Amino acid sequence: MDQSVIAGIGMTMLLITGEVDLSIGSLVAFVGVVTMDIVNKTHSTALGVLAGLALGALTGLANGLVRT
């Protein structure tokens, strides 16, 4: 699935519940840049994907805690 589709599904759920969260675009961009930076420096796709998932989970958790 494309990255925009995954983000769009999450945004659809937020809009249905009446919440509007515009920060998802910056979080997706930040995680993508850091992930590709790790892949380029280590030449390990697996490490980059794992780091991206971990960073995405942490930034999403922090964003969720700040917003609620």
Image: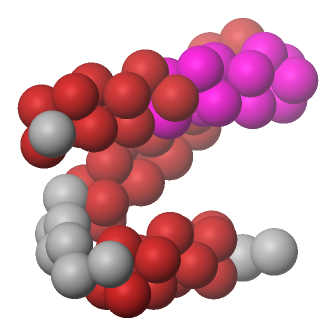
Residue 48 highlighted magenta (yes or no)? yes
Query: Considering depth in this image, is 22 or 52 the residue closer to the camera?
Result: 22
Name above or below for residue 21 compared with residue 44: below
Q: What residue is rendered at 64% in x and 30% in y? A: 53
Residue 25: image quadrant is: bottom left
Query: Considering depth in this image, is 25 or 11 the residue closer to the camera?
Result: 11
* Left or right for 16, reference 66: right
Tell me where the magenta segment starts and ends, as one range. Answer: 43-56
Query: Looking at the image, which residue sits at the far front?
Result: 17
Q: Main secondary structure of the magenta part?
A: helix
Query: Considering depth in this image, is 47 or 65 the residue closer to the camera?
Result: 65
Query: Considering depth in this image, is 27 or 47 the residue closer to the camera?
Result: 27
Name above or below for residue 52 compared with residue 25: above
Image x and y of residue 68, in percent: 15, 39
Q: What residue is rendered at 60% in x and 30% in y? A: 52
Q: How many marks?
A: 0
Image x and y of residue 35, in percent: 57, 33
